[in-house]
Structure formats: C-alpha cells, structure tokens
Image: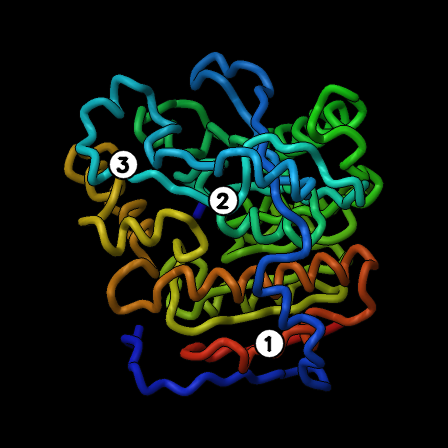
Amino acid sequence: MRRGAPWMATLVAAATLAGCSGTGTGEGQAFSRPGPHAVGVTTLDLGTDGTLGERRVTIFYPADGASAARRPAYSYKVGDPLPQALVAIVPAKFDPTITSTARVEPAGSAAGPFPVVLFSHGFGASRLFYSHLLTGIASWGFVVVSADYLERGLLAQALHSPATDSPALDLEIMFSSLTAVEALSADPSSPLHGLADSKEVAAVGHSAGGQTAFDALADPRVRTAVGWAPVGPSAAPSRKPVVIIGARNDIALTPATLTSEYHAFRGDTTFVEVSNEGHNTFTDLCPSIRGGGGGLVGFAVSLHLISGELAQLATNGCTARNIPADRFWPIVQAYTVASLRAGLGISTQPPATAVDGSEFAGFHITVQHHR
C-alpha cells in the first residue's frame, strides 16, 4: 500500500453474482489453468537510477513449445533485488529459490503478435515477485511486461532510501517499459521479434501498482486495467473497462475500501472479492512466508530493515489460517485473463459471467458488476 475469520475445512465453496445477470458459461473455467502457449522469460535494463542502481524489466511471453522444452526453467532467488553484500548474510532458509513453469529465452511463438500487458508491482515488492501469476497470464496469449518501480520497491525499503515515487514517475516507468518491448519486437535478433502488438495494451497492478494501472488508462494506448488489491487512481477514475480483484481478509485495501473504489468508477466495472486470503497472497513470496519461518520478511524484520507496518502487509494472507496461495492464484488468473480478453475485445463475454466461481473449492467469491 502506498501511502478475519480463520478458514474452516468444512467451508463450502460458493459464488454470488450481484448487480449482473447470468452465470458462468464455462468459457472462463479453463483460464485458471495453463493456457495453450509455452512461456518464455527475458530481462533487460531500462537504465541506471542514480540512487538505487539498475532498473530492469522482466518480460513473460508466449513461446515456441519445442524451443521452450530445450531451455532451462526460469527461477530467481527471493533476495535478488537486494545488494549482494546484504544477501550474503541472509541464511539460506530465508532466501528460497522461486521456480516457475516459464523457460529462459526460448524463441517466441509463431502465433503472434499478442496484446501487451503492463504490470506494476506493489509497495515493498519487486518485478520478480509475481512470476507464477504473470507466467499463467502470458500462457493465454499476452506479452506481460513487469518493470522495477525501484522507488517503492524492496530495495528502497531495505536501504531506507530517500528516493520517493510519484504517480507521474510511475507512468514514465511503465511506458518506458512499453517502449523497450516495442524495440525488442522490432529486433530480428530478439526472442520477442514480432510478438508485441503495441496497439492492444492493458495494465495490471498490485496494491500501489494498481494505482499506476488505473492511471495508465488516461493514455489512449491503454484500453483496460485490472487491479489486484489496488490503490485507487490518483486522478478522476477512467470510464474504460476496469476490474478490481480483492481479498476479503486484506488489512490494507479492505473490502470497504475496494467497494468505494468500485462505485467511484463510472464505466464498465467489475469487483471480484475472494474469501480467506489477504494482501500479499497475490505474490510468489507467500508460500515461503507461510512455511519458512517468515521467509525473507521475517529475516528483514529481525534486522529492522523494514517497518512493522510493511511486515504486517507482507504476512497478511500468508499464515497457516489462510488457504495456500497456490490455490488462490488460479482464481486471480482466471478473472484477470477473462478481464483482459473482454477489455481488449478478444471475447464478448464480460468477466462477471465468464468464470464460474464454484469451480474453486474452499472459497466464497462475490462478483459485482456495473456499467
């Protein structure tokens, strides 16, 4: 963020649609699973920030299946955003390796070009920390571009950096990452050659990154946005299609806060609320926090590298009382993919009816929709 009740094993899965008609037709059920494309990953520099070092962007893209099968799996260490001198003192159990089903720099899919999704991470996070969800989205035919917003990222918090972010700077970073992807798509030597359709652009963001995604709608190139537990827009809400996905036990972007955001948007707007999870369940870090003595967050707290408030947010949704994150990610993926397809005109079915929430056992999902 910028500026509940424990799960019971007997909870019955349910989904309620309020403010719209119809039920899931089944089209969206598959979106919770890997899509038809293998996924590749490549990373490039966006330039050097004088205070915080290299600003990078990691791109998840539809890949050629045969090429992907020959490439190593994409992975990263949780401590990778931090300076090596600091990571060196972190015990191995607090710095796990995260491995996704994506592959390192295979050739791109011949089925392109594909729409571009610009992703903005949350406060105290990193471009790296969402690889499971971003891989899943890319597998459904999107080039997903995840940039470093260093001024609000993990490194800035660990170093107590005086650098500050702003809505204007965040948009500058987001669209710099789009420019970089356009250049790679035009480069015959790049694995992204011919892949990015920069006339079809959407934005997705988590927490503080949700504000960036919503602000990006002011740009004529961006047609739709999805916010995961999002901060609201910094200016007047757009009338373009918007989807908000929240967790009912979120202590930062609470159901009441997100309900207010939902009603503030005047266009085609959907609000998906999922039970049993919290603010950080959207990230790759949740399993290590839940099962590894607090993960890197626990270690950072012990050294007073992050504030107590940030530590609370980092563990929210990642305790033994919550359903494991890897059961929550398919819900977020399904509604996000359905939202992107509807917002970009790939599908005529709105996200409010494209996904059958009763598919997700153990969760209660409420969906509201207005135009």
The image quadrant where one finds the C terminus is: bottom right
As displayed, is residue 21 above or below residue 340?
Answer: below
**Helix, strand or loop status at disc 1:** strand
Mark 1 Cα within 10 Å, few/some/many (few <14, many 20+)?
A: many
Residue 2 in view, yes or no: no
In percent of width and height, residue 196 lies at: 77, 37
Residue for badge 1: 367
Return the disc, 1 or 3, that comes first in the chain's sequence. Answer: 3
- The residue located at (57%, 65%) in the rendering is 32
Looking at this view, is 114 or 302 the one in front? 114
Using the numbered discs, state the Cα–Cα distance from disc 1 to disc 2 in whole angstroms.
Answer: 26 Å
Residue for badge 2: 131
As drawn, is 63 to the left or to the right of 130?
right
On residue 79, the disc is: none
Mark 3 Cα within 10 Å, few/some/many (few <14, many 20+)?
A: many
- The residue located at (81%, 59%) in the rendering is 346
Using the numbered discs, state the Cα–Cα distance from disc 2 to disc 3 in whole angstroms.
Answer: 16 Å
The amino acid beneath tag 2 is Ser
In percent of width and height, residue 199 lies at: 84, 41
Q: Nearer the viewer, mark 1 or mark 2?
A: 2
The amino acid beneath tag 1 is Val
Residue for badge 3: 95
Looking at this view, is 173 or 196 the one in front? 196
The amino acid beneath tag 3 is Asp
